[in-house]
């Protein structure tokens, strides 16, 4: 019996199944690639045996491991951010892209790429290799703050205004990005395309060092949001009726999303659909309670992104597809099919 | 239990509610009546903490705004006019969700409320698939789960809790509310549009017009042909039932004062 009385998958077996999937995705992601590794190699490197192949050890430690960790973390954060926004907006179609976080972060990154040699030369000289990720993070968080300021008037936060502010911010950021693209040189354009398509291809320990603390902080704060977000599903006024400070809840949610998505875009570029597809899937299979949706979105989001990244490395080998493109290819049709199949969205 | 003194609410510079006084005792059921736009919902929103107010609202002797939110959630429950659930939650989950953090986990309370509101058979059903009446009873179950087992007095605010229900379920819901009010020391303030339901179940009726409380008394004092004509603008016959409460039978609308300026009316005459 894998379904309960309400016709949903049972929680226990589902968690088990998802954990298995996560482990399989992890092993696959670490072993496959231009230099194939065997599970035995991984074991011998981790156990510190002398017999370990030095190349295998280098590939594992310097390339595969940071890539897997970063991919999992980014997937988890994007999925959880999507779930939080969907709860907050009471709209299953909400996404981190919606309130402009992703657009703001990528605009800042693109500005560094295109203007790095001219106007932003000082910043590049000052920040060095960190210039791009830090700029993306600042851009993402700055956008959240801006949207927040616009929506937060007279001591109250209007979710509708926040949503509309997101649309305006997206439009302006899109136009600015277009303008920068227009002025970019060929070489800059290549780097820029790479960024807007999203990729884990250059994942290093340095990226992890920059992004992971923010992403982990965002994930650690989410349990506090479980009960208030459940109340949000009944409507904004009900949150207050149930004794939660509505504005504090909104503020925490926005900061968590800004922090997580800003950091995720900073290290991996624009990767869409994770925040949209994963929470939706979890809700359809296991119900809408955030006690279930938030942690399992993190697990499934991480797994999905790592798996998609593995596929992206194999399909056009020895080249690799950008993961953002890959996610859009999988996510778009999948989400459309879900929409058409379900009566209630 | 609840003591309202000179309550005023302004929204965007416009005074919506003016100078309302109200005393509500534990176990008492007061029906809030009035034409559309009289300020009933705004008054209820002030009491439910959704709108800022001027004046004083004391709940068990303590000003509403000074209550600690979680403790208040255990003493005051609010049922909004409309709640749309777009997400796949089950009936049981929605009622459970009504339990504030400060309440002990108790599924017995949840199941008992579902049984009392005849929703027991739907316990594992998805809420978005329920009928309007079922959803309304479900929301009442959720709201009651918040305060029904709290020790001491509590306040229940209902905004049109019977509007989507058939007559049998209207009786069921209001009988349950009255029963719980008496048994659990709940003070209930309910907005209703059905004057006969108000007369049948209200210990007192409070009549509002243009943001003011124009009458507060027993059904037979409030529901008179003269009052109904003045406040609502319709003619009515009042039948005094042997059950002890009056019944209102509308017999037509009072001709509008502005009728001559209405081109359609002028044409007809």
Image (spheres, rainbow, N blue to C red):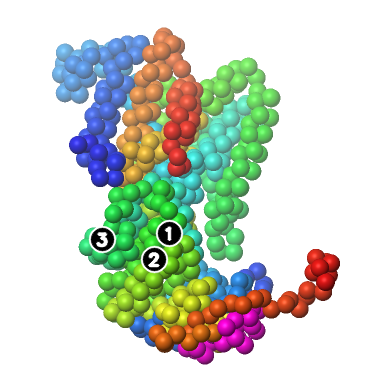
Residue at coordinates 43% horizontally, 11% vertically from top-left?
A316
Cβ–Cβ below 8 Å for labels 2 and 1?
yes
Seen in the image, is B110 located left or right of residue A313? Answer: left
Q: Which sits earlier in the primary sequence, circle 3 or circle 2?
A: 3
Q: How far apart are the alpha carbons under marks 2 and 1? A: 8 Å
Host chain of mark 3: B
Note whether B96 is above or below A6 in the view shown: below
SS for callout 1: helix
Seen in the image, is A201 located left or right of residue B265? Answer: left
Q: Which residue is mark 3?
A: B111
Host chain of mark 2: B
| Mark carried by residue B169 | 2
- Kindly tell me whether residue A27 is visible in this rendering: yes
Quadrant of res B34: bottom right
Give the label, 3 or 1, closer to the camera: 1
SS for callout 3: helix
Q: How far apart are the alpha carbons under marks 3 and 2? A: 18 Å
- Kindly tell me whether residue A149 is visible in this rendering: no
Count of marks placed on residues: 3
Residue at coordinates 58% horizontally, 44% vertically from top-left?
A166
Q: Position of residue A132 (x, y in %)?
A: 52, 31
Note whether B115 is above or below B45 in the view shown: above
Extent of the magenta region = B217-237
Seen in the image, is A104 located left or right of residue B113? Answer: right
| Mark carried by residue B133 | 1
Q: Which sits earlier in the primary sequence, circle 2 or circle 1?
A: 1
Quadrant of res A58: top left
Host chain of mark 1: B
Q: Which sits earlier in the primary sequence, circle 3 or circle 1?
A: 3
On whether disc 3 and disc 1 are found on a single subunit, the reply is yes
């Amino acid at each position: 019996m894998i379904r309960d009385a309400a016709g949903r998958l049972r929680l226990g077996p589902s968690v088990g199944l998802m954990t298995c999937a996560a482990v399989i995705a992890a092993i696959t992601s670490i072993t496959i690639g231009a230099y194939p590794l065997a599970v035995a190699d991984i074991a011998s490197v981790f156990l510190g045996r002398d017999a370990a192949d030095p190349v295998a050890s280098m590939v594992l430690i310097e390339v595969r491991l940071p890539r897997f960790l970063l991919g999992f973390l980014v997937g988890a954060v994007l999925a959880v951010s999507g779930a939080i926004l969907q709860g907050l907006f009471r709209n299953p179609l909400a996404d981190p892209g919606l309130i402009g976080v992703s657009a703001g972060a990528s605009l800042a990154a693109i500005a560094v790429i295109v203007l790095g040699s001219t106007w932003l030369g000082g910043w590049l000289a000052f920040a060095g290799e960190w210039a791009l990720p830090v700029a993306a993070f600042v851009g993402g968080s700055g956008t959240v703050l801006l949207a927040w300021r616009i929506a937060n008037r007279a001591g109250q936060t209007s979710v509708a205004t926040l949503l509309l502010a997101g649309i305006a911010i997206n439009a302006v950021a899109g136009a600015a990005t277009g303008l920068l693209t227009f002025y970019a040189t060929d070489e800059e354009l290549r780097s820029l395309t790479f960024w807007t398509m999203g990729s884990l291809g250059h994942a290093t320990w340095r990226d992890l060092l920059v992004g992971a603390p923010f992403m982990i902080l965002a994930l650690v704060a989410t349990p506090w949001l479980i009960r208030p977000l459940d109340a949000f599903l009944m409507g904004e006024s009900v949150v207050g009726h149930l004794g939660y400070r509505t504005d504090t809840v909104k503020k925490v949610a926005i900061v968590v999303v800004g922090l997580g998505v800003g950091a995720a875009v900073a290290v991996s570029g624009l990767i869409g659909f994770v925040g949209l597809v994963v929470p939706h899937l979890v809700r359809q299979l296991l119900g809408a309670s955030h006690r279930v949706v938030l942690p399992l979105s993190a697990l499934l989001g991480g797994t999905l992104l790592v798996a998609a990244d593995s596929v992206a490395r194999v399909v056009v080998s020895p080249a690799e597809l950008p993961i953002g493109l890959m996610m859009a290819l999988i996510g778009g049709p999948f989400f459309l099919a879900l929409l058409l199949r379900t009566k209630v969205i | 239990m609840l003591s309202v003194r000179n309550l005023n609410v302004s929204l965007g510079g416009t005074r919506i509610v003016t100078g309302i006084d109200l005393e509500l005792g534990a176990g008492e059921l007061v029906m809030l009546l009035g034409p559309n736009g009289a300020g009933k919902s705004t008054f209820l929103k002030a009491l439910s903490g959704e709108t800022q107010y001027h004046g004083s609202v004391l709940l068990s002797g303590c000003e509403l705004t000074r209550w600690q939110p979680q403790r208040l959630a255990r003493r005051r429950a609010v049922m909004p006019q409309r709640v749309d659930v777009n997400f796949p939650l089950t009936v049981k989950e929605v009622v459970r969700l009504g339990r504030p953090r400060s309440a002990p986990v108790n599924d017995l309370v949840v199941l008992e409320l579902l049984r009392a509101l005849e929703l027991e058979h739907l316990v594992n059903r998805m809420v978005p698939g329920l009928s309007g009446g079922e959803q309304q009873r479900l929301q009442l179950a959720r709201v009651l789960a918040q305060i029904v087992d709290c020790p001491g007095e509590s306040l229940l605010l209902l905004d049109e809790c019977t509007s989507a229900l058939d007559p049998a379920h209207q009786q069921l819901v209001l009988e349950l509310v009255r029963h719980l009010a008496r048994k659990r020391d709940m003070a209930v303030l309910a907005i209703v549009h059905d004057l006969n339901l108000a007369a049948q179940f209200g210990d007192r009726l409070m009549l509002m017009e243009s943001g003011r409380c124009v009458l507060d008394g027993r059904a037979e004092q409030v529901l008179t042909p003269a009052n109904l004509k003045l406040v609502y603008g319709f003619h009515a016959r009042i039948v005094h039932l042997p059950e002890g409460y009056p019944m209102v039978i509308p017999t037509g609308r009072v001709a509008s004062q502005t009728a001559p300026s209405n081109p359609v009316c002028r044409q007809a005459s």
